[in-house]
Image (cartoon, rainbow, N blue to C red):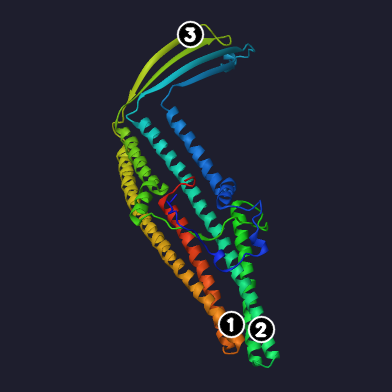
Amino acid sequence: MIKWKSLSTFTLTALFVVLPTSFAAMPDDALSLQDCIHQALQNNKAIKIAVNNKDKADWTVREAQGAKGVTFSLIHKETRFNPLLANGVGDDKYTNNFANQVAISLPVYTGGKLEGQISQARHNADITALSLDAARQQLFLDTTTAYFSVLQYQDDLLVSQQTVADYIEHLNTTRDKYDAGLVAKSDVLQTQVKLANAQDGLIIARNNYINAAASLNNLIGRPQGQEVKLKEHLSYEPITVTLDEATHQALTRRPEIIQARTGIASAEDQITVAKSGRLPAVLASATNSWYNDKLPGSDNSNWQISFMASMNLFDSGVVNSQIRQAEYDLATAKEQEQQLQESVELEVRQQYHSLREAESRIELSKIAINQAEEDMDIYKTRYEAGVGTNLEVMDAAVSLAAAKTNAIKALYDYNISKARLERAMGIAIAE
């Protein structure tokens, strides 16, 4: 994986809220990210289809190799007829004839056709195997995204719960002051409105968390309504990889890039196969036949060994057309490889800068949370002392909730950008 600096890890949850009972304890059945990836790889239908395609491609190679080997065939023929009836004479005497033949053939020279087909089959098998790698890496990214989405909405839910708790506490304080005749009823009404809005946000946050958990369960092959318990939290760990290093790794290890380059080699093989139509072909064969009126027949045996050479002298331009088509396919494959390379370079650059942007936001969010908490304490103290306004407390509460939400979003964006960068770089799942 991307190399990490051995620096302190910043975990969002520890910054601003104590986990509630539903999240605080670490149950034995809690899932790590690797657990989810493993389950997804085991259960995902797209991966199973890709594995089947890879196995099929391996057998295609064996088929191509077999065409270059020895072919053995056995023919047995039985006939029963009445020669007199065939001539219009009414006689019921029938004759039985038996024939047996064993034949062996071997292609001696095909002008490079069979060799080209074998090489092309191998390259196509490599392409199929790379498709499996790409599918696994995409599933790795999808699972990682779903996992961190659950963590994001889990932390959003924590913020919403804490915000509602803060408003309830402040509402109690406001009512006490109102009952004592120290504040106007408008302070109580304002706080009640803010509490209602916060409770509305809590409902939305809880629904987002439930939907995210269902999506993760669906992706890894578990019942969608099953409770999700995760081991990890949104956290930040610095990385050392540079943009140039990430780009170089992507261009050398990304499965799609290697596929495109292998596709060029396969197109070159097709040209070799097409050009073989201009060259002679030599086939060696040996046969032995037996003819008798008994099965299997041992009399009237004869055998022959032959070498047959053939060459296409004129085909109205068919072979030339095949060669030209293969050449255009090769030119297309080269352009596609270049196009893909440029696309991958752009993808790496975008994900790298997105990661660095989120990294900067993480640092700012820590400062913002500290300042917002300090402001909240100040305005609550001022209000309780009778020298501050309810509006100041409300504004401070909104700012604190926003700072916490922004911190969650920054951590989520950072981790997702890291996962997308790893996918863009072609990092294998097991690394």
- Marks 2, 3: nearer the viewer: 2
Q: Secondary structure at mark 3?
A: loop
The answer to whether residue 138 is left or right of residue 19 is left
Q: Is residue 340 visible?
A: no
User: Where does residue 387 sit, x and y in percent of width and height?
Assistant: 57, 90
Local secondary structure at mark 2: helix
* Residue linked to disc 1: 380
What residue does disc 3 label? 301
Residue 35 visible? The answer is yes
Question: Is 213 placed above or below 429 here?
Answer: below
Disc on res. 173: 2
Q: CA distance from mark 2 to mark 3?
A: 114 Å
Of labels 1 and 2, earlier in sequence is 2
What percent of the width, then of the height, locates residue 66? 45, 27
Q: Earlier in the sequence, mark 1 or mark 3?
A: 3
Label 2 near label 1: C-beta < 8 Å?
yes
Label 3 amino acid? Ser
How packed is label 3: few (under 14 Cα within 10 Å), some, or many (20 or more)?
A: some
How many marks can you see? 3
